[in-house]
Amino acid sequence: MILHPWHEAPTGFQAPHSINALVEISTGMRTKYKVDKERGLLKLDRILYSSIQYPANYGFIPQTLAADMDPLDIIIICREPILPLCLVAARIIGVMRMIDQGKVDDKILAVAMHDASTSRMQDVEDIDFTFKVELKEFFESYTRLENKVVSVPDFQGREQACSIIEEAIRHYNEVYK
């Protein structure tokens, strides 16, 4: 029996401030994986068209539902790449507001709780400016060769991120429970 990572992994006992994240894509990859919503298996979505690679571990928060009807996306800042489908305890530090093809597609920003190199990061202001520029550039660029328009107008702090997570948990519970 295959457990479904979106529906059966716990959100975390201290949500929305500390949560569990499920990694789909490791830092440094050019392969875009997604958890199949129906089966719960990790599937190859595509190989990125551009030569850039994911600047951080990327995945979702279990038992959440964002406005795009997908699990809420999360970027996990960590010194090391984390393997896909690994459950990671993460502390929320902010949100990267993103518009994908005219629709809101927020990316929650978090740090791996078991990585001492990120322990000082408490809010979005603690992220190095150049890393924020790299995140923005990656998400605006990686779909350009696919003729998609993505913009990152804003980074916001922990309070806004926690509010988005609470709404995504509420939305999930309305639809799936």
Image (tube, grey):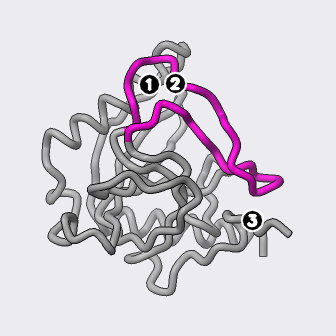
- Three-letter residue code for mark 1: Tyr
Dot 1 or dot 2, earlier in sequence? 2
Magenta residue check for 6: no
Dot 3 or dot 2, earlier in sequence? 3
Q: Which of marks 1 and 2 is in front?
A: 2
Residue 48 numbered mark, or none: 2
Q: Which residue is drawn at 75% across and 65% down?
A: 4
In what element is the residue under mark 1? loop
Q: Which residue is drawn at 30% across and 58% down?
A: 78
Q: In which quarter of the image is the C terminus?
A: bottom right
Query: Real-space Cα distance between discs 3 and 2?
Result: 26 Å
Residue matched to label 3: 4
Q: Which residue is drawn at 38% across and 51% down?
A: 81
Residue 103 numbered mark, or none: none
- Three-letter residue code for mark 2: Leu
Residue 142 numbered mark, or none: 1
> Does 34 sit above or below residue 103?
below
The answer to whether the residue labelled 1 contacts the one labelled 2, judged by CB atoms less than 8 Å apart, is yes
Dot 3 or dot 1, earlier in sequence? 3
Q: Which of marks 3 and 1 is in front?
A: 3
